Amino acid sequence: MADATRTETADRLFEAHVAHDLAAWRGKAGRARLAGRVESFWRWAERVTLAEVVDRDTARAATERLVLDLELPDRLAAVIGEIADELVRLEVNRSTRVRDVIDQSLFDDGVDLVVELETLRARLIQRLLNSPVYMALASDLLYQGIKDYIFSDSGAIRSIPGVSRLIKGSSSAVSRRMPGLEAQVETRVRAYIEANTARTLARTESYLLESLDARRLRALADEVWAAIADQPLSIADAVASHELQRLVDYGLQVWRSLRETEYLGVMIDQGVQAYFARHGDDTLAELMSHVGVDRKILAAEVDTLAPMLIEALESTGLLETWVRDQLADFYDSAAFAAAIEGRG
């Protein structure tokens, strides 16, 4: 509805302007208008740099707000879980093999990369074997293996002179006939393992570094490829829906916890600063080219998607509302009244 203070002439001009603007967004005229907008935007993007559009501090603050402060609703985990479960259960996962999505030449390229990065491979092996977690696991595995060997029915304890005669039936009788024996064995075995684990792992490290040469790595990779190439991608049999949801829930909990740490804030801050230091003087067109977007791609996507969006906006009445709101600011202004009365 026209403003009450607007003259009849002004009202007719306003309605004609609204009709003209709406028509300009429809059909071929709309496509031509969009193409012109894309062309003018790209010419602008080719001469304007990132630093000219937004300064470093503003970009940093915006990134921190979006990453650290944006509240994640509780419903988000359920939505992600539902979508993930739908994707996992798709029948196409059962009919698609590993080789259908990973070309063997690409797999071989990855093997070649592992072979070439010999120094990195050695460093990873060293860090793994020197990890306290790995050392504890290795010690426990060694202890359990030795203990089972000693006390099993066919184990070493039956060969000990005198002890074998005490066993009537199975070796488990040792614990009853000689109550302190198993505890003494555990103490001595664990002490031995703890004293020798580092040396054992050092020998293991040397063995791995020597044995994992290019020939063996490629042979191992060939065995892996032969084993998995024709396997289906489906993990539906391995992961139940409720288990998948729990994994998603936990992942979001980890993310929420990480967002509260000072560490992530420092990483974001330094990341934005480093990006501006390297690319602040690059034009927007150059930055878009970093992710594969050029003038032709942008124009094609806008020509494909924008008309459908505009049609939806028009069919729901929102496009006309926007046009009227934008034009009304001018037609109801004192500047327009002065111009139409010749007082400008």
Image (cartoon, rainbow, N blue to C red):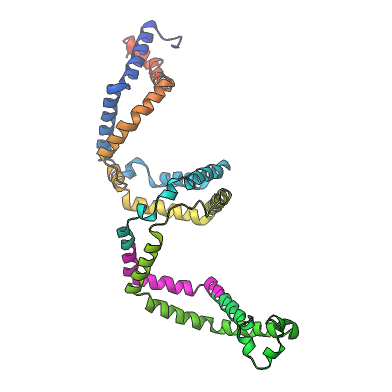
Q: Residue at x 31, y 62 (%)?
A: 109
Q: Residue at x 34, y 30 (%)?
A: 306
**Residue 12 in view of the camera:** yes
Residue 255 versus residue 82: which sits nearer the camera? 82
Q: Position of residue 113 (x, y in %)?
A: 32, 65
Per the picture, the main secondary structure of the magenta-coloured stretch is helix
Q: Position of residue 241 (x, y in %)?
A: 56, 48
Asked if 16 appears above or below 229 in the picture, the reply is above
Q: Residue furthest top?
A: 8
Q: Is residue 170 magenta?
A: no
Give the image quarter of residue 215: bottom left
Give the image quarter of residue 204: bottom left
Q: Residue at x 43, y 53 (%)?
A: 233
Give the image quarter of residue 29: top left
Asked if 13 appears above or below 59 in the picture, the reply is above
Q: Is residue 228 left or right of residue 48?
A: right
Residue stretch in magenta:
110-137
Residue 230 versus residue 135: which sits nearer the camera? 230
Residue 46 versus residue 26: which sits nearer the camera? 26
Q: Is residue 141 left or right of residue 101?
A: right
